[in-house]
Image: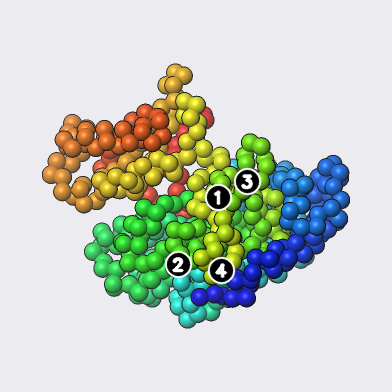
Amino acid sequence: MFFQPSIETLPVTQLRQLQNERLRDLVKYVYSRIPFYKKKFDEAGLNPSFIRSVDDLQKIPFTFKADLRDHYPFRLFAVSQDKIARIHCSSGTTGKPTVVGYTKNDIDIFAEVCARSLTAAGAMPGMKLQNAYGYGLFTGGLGLHYGAEKLGMTVIPVSGGMTDRQILLLRDIQAEVMCCTPSYALTIVEEIKKRHIDPSELKLKYMVLGAEPWTEAIREEVQKGLSVIATNIYGLSEIIGPGVSQEDFEERGTGSHVWEDHFFPEIIDPVSKEPLPEGEFGVLCFTTLTKEATPLLRYWTNDITYLYYDKSSQRTHIKMGAIRGRADDMLIIRGINLFPSQIESVINELPEFSPHYQLLVSRQQTMDSVDVHVELNEKIYAALTDKISDENEPEIFQALRYKLSQKIKDSIGLSMNVIIRNYNTVPRSEGGKLNRVVDSRKK
Ligand code: ADP
């Protein structure tokens, strides 16, 4: 199903034409309205007329999160305050929040891309959406709220957290669609099990999960645990919020369509800063082609992924792979670059463990050390007669610890300490994004 079939299936040559027209207007727009961009262009000896098509984007310098912070709060706004209908901030996962603004038109586009995304996720007019993304400065809640209304759904604006209430409402109001972070979806799965609720008592069919990296193993856990179809939604406040890209529910696992009539994506080599070809991993950058209030040229998201055109999809828009991590989430352990998601993948290959984990990184003298905290999966744990305590360790633990640390060593090349904890003691999401790494070396 499509929300806007003609644009979602527009042949790539026509899509490119539209992007080129929009880019030309955008460049003139930011040059004349935002002194930061005028200065950047002038310093680079660039005139807006030099930018004729998306192939010329490479001539334009990148915009970084630091630029937003340096111009905090309003100095990257392209319109006067009276044209701003709403303000959001990034959740500040990686530092001070950044402020973004929306004109009425920007809010319409935000709703449009969220409606497109919900449709690709399986939602239809008349269905109910239980929206468990946080409402407030975070873009998730309001973004999907407006998108669902635009699509013609009924929204239940629960916001994040309040697990008891989420479950009560899922049972009594019977939403067919729910959106939240993947880590919170796992919390819901566990709670449902704990309360012996059969997923067939709920009407839930589709989960739209995003705002943090997740894996196929989490998808499987959520789909099985709730008897649903779970798809990925991606976005960031600087570009618009959720709805920058979305996975089609019938094409799960093959990447998320970037709505490239509004957000032009590039993949850049983090070292050479040169664009990379289709299929190669690098930093995702976006140019907002239609944003009025806070337009951005070549915004460096820091998210690591790849792009490719999936010719077998009816939608023509480019796909992006799952986010491998943020460039600044990358840990350097004894000189080796490591993304937490790499350890997650290894843990997920061993069915004995639950998908919950936490990494504690420390430095002893000059040596980096990583403790990988994991738990046994619920079934194995329940079958253990002797539970874990300081004095007592079930026998199979030694073997499992060895198995996991060997697997980590083989696939990543680093030795790590595996610590097996009691079921349900590794931190869970209480509604929002979950931080799975504690790096005490930074103190
Ligand atoms: P903050 O940067 O403070 O977390 P945002 O709420 O705007 O602010 O978060 C955007 C970031 O969240 C993205 O840049 C990306 O790192 C992450 N993110 C959002 N959606 C996804 C997703 N589906 N998969 C992986 N990461 C995601």
Crowding at dot 3, Cα within 10 Å, few <14 / some 14-19 / many 20+, comes out as some
Q: In this rendering, does residue 408 appear at all?
A: yes
The answer to which of marks 3 and 4 sits earlier in the sequence is 3
Crowding at dot 2, Cα within 10 Å, few <14 / some 14-19 / many 20+, comes out as many
Residue labelled with disc 2:
249
Distance from Cα at disc 2 to Cα at disc 3 = 28 Å
The answer to which of marks 2 and 3 sits earlier in the sequence is 2
Distance from Cα at disc 3 to Cα at disc 4 = 23 Å
Tell me the SS state at disc 3. Answer: loop
- Where, by quadrant of the figure, is residue 308 drawn? bottom right
Identify the residue shown where x is 18% and y is 34%. Answer: 393
Q: Which label number is shown at residue 279?
A: 1
Query: Amino acid type of disc 2?
Result: Phe
Tell me the SS state at disc 4. Answer: loop
Q: Position of residue 368 (x, y in %)?
A: 44, 25
Query: What colouring method underlies this structural image?
Result: rainbow
